[in-house]
Structures are given as structure tokens and as C-alpha cells.
Image (cartoon, rainbow, N blue to C red):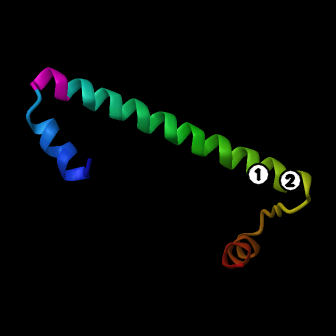
Amino acid sequence: MSFSDVVEAIKSLSTEEKQEIQLLLKQYLREERREQIYENFKRAQLEEQNGELKFSSNINELRQMMEE
């Protein structure tokens, strides 16, 4: 089923069904974002354990780190 098929199928639904799909999509997107945040957290923990994280309060040094 293609994306356009899904869009067409949604168009034919009742208003209540469309609202339910909207709620479900918001929930799925929240769950995906939480998973992304968790994966980033795990990656940062691993980098910290491996001594790969760098910290600085110097703005110029931070800019240089971002460019690396």
C-alpha cells in the first residue's frame, strides 16, 4: 500500500475515525521521539565511559568543538 493509498483511505473515514488516527499518530510520534532520546542517552553514556566526551565553559572552545 502506497502513501497516496493511505491518504485516500483516510479521506474516506468519518470525522471521528480521522480524529482517532490523529491521536494515534501523535502517540506513535511521541513514542518514537522517546526512543530516539533514549538511544542518544545510551550513546552519550558509552562515549562518557570511553572518555570521548569533551566539556568546556569557554565559548570559543565550544565553537571549535562543534566544528570538529
Q: Position of residue 27 (x, y in %)?
A: 41, 30
Kindly identify which residue carries mark 2. Answer: 48
Element class at badge 1 = helix
Type of amino acid under label 2? Glu
Residue 16 within the segment the image draws in magenta: yes
Kindly identify which residue carries mark 1. Answer: 44
Q: CA distance from mark 1 to mark 2?
A: 6 Å
Q: Measuring 77% from the left and 69% from the top, which residue is drawn there?
A: 58
Front residue of 15 and 41? 15
Element class at badge 2 = helix
Q: Position of residue 56 (x, y in %)?
A: 80, 64
Q: Is residue 64 left or right of residue 45?
A: left
Q: Is residue 55 left or right of residue 66?
A: right
Q: Measuring 26% from the left and 47% from the top, which residue is drawn there?
A: 1
Decide whether the magenta segment is chiefly helix, strand or loop: helix
Please give the range of residues in magenta.
14-18
Q: Measuring 25% from the left and 24% from the top, which residue is drawn there?
A: 20
Occupied quadrant, residue 21? top left
Q: Is residue 43 left or right of residue 28?
A: right
Q: Position of residue 22 (x, y in %)?
A: 26, 31
Mark 2 Cα-neighbour bin, 10 Å: few <14, some 14–19, many ≥20: few
Q: Measuring 68% from the left and 72% from the top, which residue is drawn there?
A: 66
Type of amino acid under label 1? Ala
Which numbered tag is attached to residue 19?
A: none
Front residue of 59 and 12? 12
Name the outermost residue toward the front: 1
Name the outermost residue toward the top: 16
1 and 2 marks in contact (CB < 8 Å): yes
As displayed, is residue 39 above or below residue 55? above
Q: Quadrant of the C terminus?
A: bottom right
Occupied quadrant, residue 59? bottom right
